[in-house]
Amino acid sequence: MIEAQFEQLSEEWFQARVGVPSASCFDKIVTSKGEPSKQAVNYAYTLAGERIAGAKAETHQSYAMARGCEMEAEARQLFKLITGHQVRQTGILYPDENKRFSCSPDGLIDEAETGLEIKSPLIHTHVAYLLARKLPTEYVQQVQGSMLITGFRTWHFFSYYPGLPPLHIEVPRDDVFIHRLSFEIDKFCALVESTVEKLKEVA
């Protein structure tokens, strides 16, 4: 695992993510069942375009996304209080020196060799999470992808909404899913590279 110590959401952090598949978007590469995603080609074209342009593509930030960013520090403090874990903030993690894909966890728990993913959803979504009492399907790829990158055996998922109980799930590594994810990421990265080469020919 390679760690780049950029402050998340900083200019350096955004620049380092240009053209690089991120765990938060692994759902665009593979489904939660380990099958190829129908969004893969568009996502590959986006990353290839970023590499040629040298900048991140503009994306819309919804109210829920903006709120999640604002509540993250509060949620992290509550997680630390409840679990007693020391959480270290980090920038970008890569599986190796090639830096073909990455993740940006909401924290690392070094002594336990695990990581943390925080979500601060809208109230109806958080209630649904509490009732289901499991890792939400929409975050399977991100959480398992983070374990693929780090090599960790577990990952903490923490959903937070003020005034309601938090949802804390310690997710075990799914080696079968990670094998499928790794295979699809390899194919995806090859698609991005070939698209970049074709764009260079057009230019």
Image: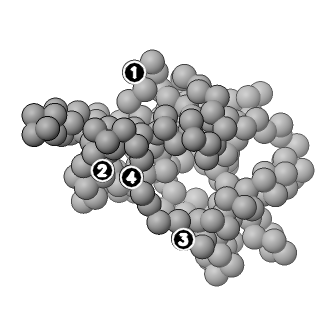
Mark seen at residue 98? 1
Q: How far from the left and from the top, in percent, is residue 3?
A: 59, 25
Q: Nearer the viewer, residue 164 or 14?
A: 14
Point out the frontmost of discs 4 and 1.
Answer: 4
On screen, residue 124 versus residue 202, left or right, reads right
Residue farthest bottom in this picture? 124
The residue identified by callout 4 is 57
Residue 2: image location, x then y, percent = 54, 22
Q: Identify the secondary structure beneath mark 3.
A: loop
Mark 2–mark 4 Cα distance, whole angstroms, equals: 7 Å
Q: Is residue 166 visible?
A: yes
Few, some or many residues within 10 Å of mark 4 (<14, 14–19, 20+): few
The answer to the question of whether label 2 and label 4 lie on touching residues, with beta carbons closer than 8 A, is yes
Examine the rendered structure and indicate whether residue 54 appears above or below residue 56. Answer: above
* Of pointers 3 and 2, the one earlier in the residue sequence: 2
Q: Residue at x 41, y 34 (%)?
A: 101
